Structure formats: structure tokens, C-alpha cells
Image (cartoon, helix red, strand yellow):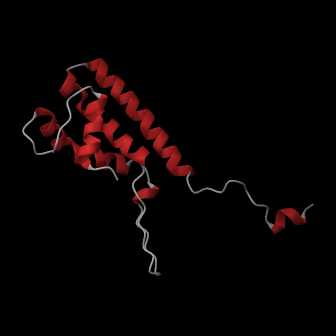
């Protein structure tokens, strides 16, 4: 998964604001992100049953853990941008634009999450084929 600072900088880039180096640096953007990141991330995580957030445990030696999805990362960044838009830009129109972008990103991420891993085609079972 992208680092916290990378997702925060993605949100800042959406707003046309300056990047940060860390959440603890002494800048307005870092302070705002430090206050909002965890709650924005958790709100996105709670908005859907994300496949990449399910911990899978195997009894065999292979215990690969799923990586966080890039569309989920974009949705988190868009959520941050929408929450910080007014504080950073003092613009209601930018805030509304960022809210729309977030809604599109979360919809796209949910769709891809719901469809990944599904079968390419349905296999007919014996009951169906026996009827013909």
C-alpha cells in the first residue's frame, strides 16, 4: 500500500497545494492532514467490505497477504481532498468538485473490488445440462 504521506500528497495534489514530507512537519497542510487522515481512511474502509482488507490465513507455509488496492488508495486521497478542500483553498466550488471526485472514485473502487476474482464465464452444472 502507498504510504500515508504519499496518499496525503495525492490529496494535496488534487487541491493544487504544496506537498508535505511528513505528517508531523510544521506546516498548515501537514497539521490538517494529521488531524483528518485516520478518520478519512477509516470512513473509506468502513464504507465497503474491501477484499484487500480481509486478512487471509493459510495453514500451509505460504502466507502471502493481499496488497492494498490502488483504487482504494485513490479513494482515500479523494476523501482527504474533499474534507480539506475548504480549509486549504477557501473555495466552496473546489470543495464540491472534490466531493464529486470522491464519490466517483469510491464508486469505481467498490465496483472493481466487488468484481475482482469473479469467474469469466459461468459453467453449466449437471442439472442444467441434463434438461437438454
Vertical order, 3 against 8 (above or below) = below
Q: Position of residue 85 (x, y in %)?
A: 25, 28
Q: Position of residue 11 (x, y in %)?
A: 29, 35
Vertical order, 95 against 32 (above or below) = above
> Residue 71's image quarter?
top left
Q: Residue furthest left?
A: 26
Q: Residue at x 17, y 38 (%)?
A: 20
Q: Residue at x 14, y 39 (%)?
A: 30
Q: Residue at x 19, y 40 (%)?
A: 33
Q: Position of residue 94 (x, y in %)?
A: 30, 21
Left or right, residue 21 beside residue 48: left
Q: Position of residue 121 (x, y in %)?
A: 72, 54
> Residue 117's image quarter?
bottom right
Left or right, residue 70 beside residue 119: left
Decide which of 59, 132 is in the foreground and name it.
Answer: 59
> Residue 52's image quarter?
bottom left
Amino acid at each position: 500500500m502507498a504510504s500515508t504521506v504519499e496518499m496525503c500528497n495525492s490529496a494535496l495534489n488534487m487541491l493544487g497545494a504544496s506537498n508535505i514530507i511528513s505528517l508531523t512537519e510544521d506546516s498548515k497542510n501537514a497539521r490538517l492532514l494529521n488531524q483528518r487522515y485516520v478518520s478519512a481512511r477509516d470512513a473509506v474502509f468502513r464504507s465497503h467490505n474491501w477484499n484487500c482488507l480481509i486478512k487471509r490465513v493459510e495453514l500451509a507455509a505460504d502466507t502471502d497477504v493481499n496488497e492494498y488496492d490502488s483504487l482504494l488508495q485513490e479513494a482515500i486521497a479523494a476523501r482527504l481532498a474533499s474534507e480539506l478542500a475548504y480549509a486549504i483553498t477557501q473555495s466552496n466550488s473546489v470543495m464540491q468538485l472534490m466531493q464529486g471526485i470522491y464519490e466517483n472514485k469510491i464508486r469505481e473502487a467498490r465496483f472493481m473490488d466487488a468484481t475482482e476474482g469473479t469467474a469469466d464465464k459461468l459453467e453449466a452444472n449437471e442439472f442444467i445440462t441434463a434438461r437438454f
